[in-house]
């Protein structure tokens, strides 16, 4: 008998206390995983190089990825999703070539979206940008250094946003801040790749490398700091992580 509901922090299922190596998800845990990974706000994601607008309560993951995340066989994932559809818990659309899963009645099992949530998100991004700007000012905080930051790190900020879009699509952790160290490494990688177009191709290579996206030992996933480190960046470019993922 339902007597109310309670909130759980996103990412709690990845707590190291729970040994995921020796257990497979139950159907209850798989359902909770779906609810946790559904978008809280409308968002545009990159699916096979095309922008796809996902709504609140939606997500897009390949069956192979779900099978790996839950420790299931591919066929079991298919059967489970079909039963969820029969019980009107989810809807699945595959028009884009990849499953777009919608949690039915999402507002009933999550906090309602407040009208100012979008404004708060933009304010958070602005705060992060301002923090990075201030950290890169000279001792006297003169306008010259501020201008230098704007010209040097504008692409780094765009690169971070592109990474976050890719990360959300593939179940990787998103980067919340453009710290001075991240800006330095991103700018170095942008220089190696010839700009944002090269960065987009690099992100496509990251998401197409299963080992970096959870298909390796212990479901480990790469993050932004990992892929922009020079000693990790070049092995990714050279395809040296491909051999760690057997599909």
Image: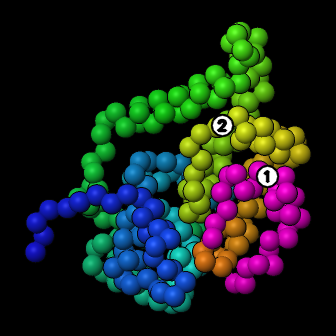
Q: Which mark is residue 229?
A: 1
Q: Nearer the viewer, residue 85 or 218?
A: 218
- Is 104 placed above or below 20 here? above
Tag 2: Cα neighbours inside 10 Å, few (<14), some, or many (≥20)? some
Region of the chain picked out in magenta, as a range: 220-247
Q: Secondary structure at mark 1?
A: loop
Residue marked by disc 2 = 179
Q: Residue at x 30, y 65 (%)?
A: 104
Q: Is residue 88 left or right of residue 76?
A: left
**Residue 17, x across and y down, in percent:** 46, 73
Among the 4 quarters of the image, the one containing residue 83: bottom left
**Residue 102, x across and y down, in percent:** 39, 64
**Residue 94, x across and y down, in percent:** 51, 70
Q: Nearer the viewer, residue 231 or 82?
A: 231
Q: Nearer the viewer, residue 82 or 142?
A: 142
Q: Is residue 120 left or right of residue 16?
A: left
Q: Is residue 77 left or right of residue 232?
A: left
Q: How far separated are the C-alphas under marks 2 and 1?
A: 14 Å
The colour style of the image is rainbow
User: Does the magenta segment cover residue 240?
Assistant: yes
For the image shown, how many numbered marks are present on the structure? Answer: 2
Q: Residue at x 44, y 69 (%)?
A: 13
Q: Residue at x 78, y 27 (%)?
A: 152
Residue 59 visible? The answer is yes
Task: Say which quadrant the C terminus sits in.
Answer: bottom right
């Amino acid at each position: 008998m339902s007597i109310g509901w309670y909130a759980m922090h996103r990412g709690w299922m990845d707590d190291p206390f729970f040994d995921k190596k020796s257990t497979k998800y139950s159907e209850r845990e798989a359902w909770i995983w779906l609810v946790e990974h559904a978008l809280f706000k409308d968002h545009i994601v990159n699916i096979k190089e095309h922008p796809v607008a996902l709504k609140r309560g939606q997500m897009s993951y390949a069956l192979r990825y779900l099978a790996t995340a839950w420790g299931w066989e591919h066929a079991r994932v298919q059967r489970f999703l079909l039963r969820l559809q029969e019980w009107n818990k989810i809807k699945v659309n595959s028009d884009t070539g990849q499953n777009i899963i919608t949690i039915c009645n999402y507002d009933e099992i999550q906090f309602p979206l407040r009208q100012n949530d979008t404004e708060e998100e933009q304010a958070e991004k602005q705060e992060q940008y301002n923090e990075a700007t201030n950290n890169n000012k000279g001792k006297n905080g003169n306008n010259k250094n501020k201008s230098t930051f704007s010209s040097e790190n504008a692409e780094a900020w765009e690169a971070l946003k592109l990474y976050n879009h890719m990360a959300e699509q593939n179940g990787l952790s998103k980067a919340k801040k453009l710290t001075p160290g991240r800006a330095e490494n991103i700018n170095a990688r942008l220089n190696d790749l010839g700009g944002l177009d090269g960065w987009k191709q690099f992100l496509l290579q990251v998401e197409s490398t299963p080992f970096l996206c959870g298909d390796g030992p212990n479901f480990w996933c790469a993050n932004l700091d990992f892929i922009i480190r020079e000693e990790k960046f070049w092995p990714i470019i050279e395809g040296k992580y491909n051999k760690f993922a057997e599909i």
